Image (tube, rainbow, N blue to C red):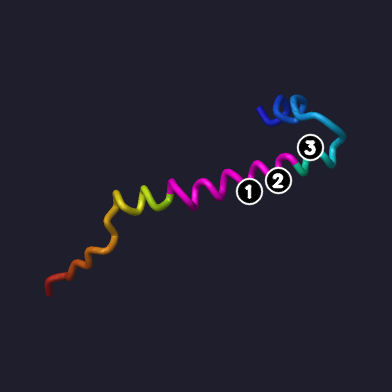
Amino acid sequence: MYGALWRVLPGPWWVRVLILLVLLVLVLWALVTWVFPWVDSLLNANEQGTVGT
């Protein structure tokens, strides 16, 4: 899969690396902006339980 992605990208190797880095940053930004907060709201980690002794 990575080889196919590498062959599809245009330009010399350094342009391909730059494109992949930009794509990686965009994916991480989308995860932090939308996906992680959505998962956090589902987990409801704010409730603190106590352990009975």
Mark 1 residue crowding within 10 angstroms, few (<14) / some (14–19) / many (20+): few
The image quadrant where one finds the N terminus is top right
Q: Are marks 3 and 1 in contact (CB under 8 Å)?
A: no
SS for callout 2: helix
Which three-letter amino acid code belongs to the residue tagged 2?
Answer: Leu
Could you tell me which residue is drawn at 43 percent across and 51 percent down?
36
- Queried whether the magenta region covers residue 38, the answer comes back as no
In the rendered structure, the answer to whether residue 44 lies left or right of residue 5 reads left
Q: Is residue 32 above or below residue 47?
A: above
Q: What span is in magenta? A: 19-35
SS for callout 3: helix
Q: Are marks 2 and 3 in contact (CB under 8 Å)?
A: no
Could you tell me which residue is drawn at 17 percent across and 70 percent down?
51
Which three-letter amino acid code belongs to the residue tagged 1?
Answer: Val
Quick one: label 2 or label 3, which is nearer the N terminus?
3
State the CA–CA distance, disc 3 to disc 1. 14 Å
Q: Are marks 2 and 1 in contact (CB under 8 Å)?
A: yes
Looking at this view, is 45 or 15 the one in front? Answer: 15
| Image coordinates for residue 44, horizontal then vertical, percent | 27, 56
The secondary structure making up most of the magenta span is: helix
Tell me the residue that label 2 is attached to. 21
Could you tell me which residue is drawn at 22 percent across and 63 percent down?
47
Tell me the residue that label 1 is attached to. 25
Disc number for residue 16 = 3
Q: Is residue 7 above or below residue 50?
A: above
| Image coordinates for residue 43, horizontal then vertical, percent | 29, 52
Outermost residue on the right side: it is: 12
- Queried whether the magenta region covers residue 24, the answer comes back as yes
Looking at this view, is 52 or 5 the one in front? Answer: 5
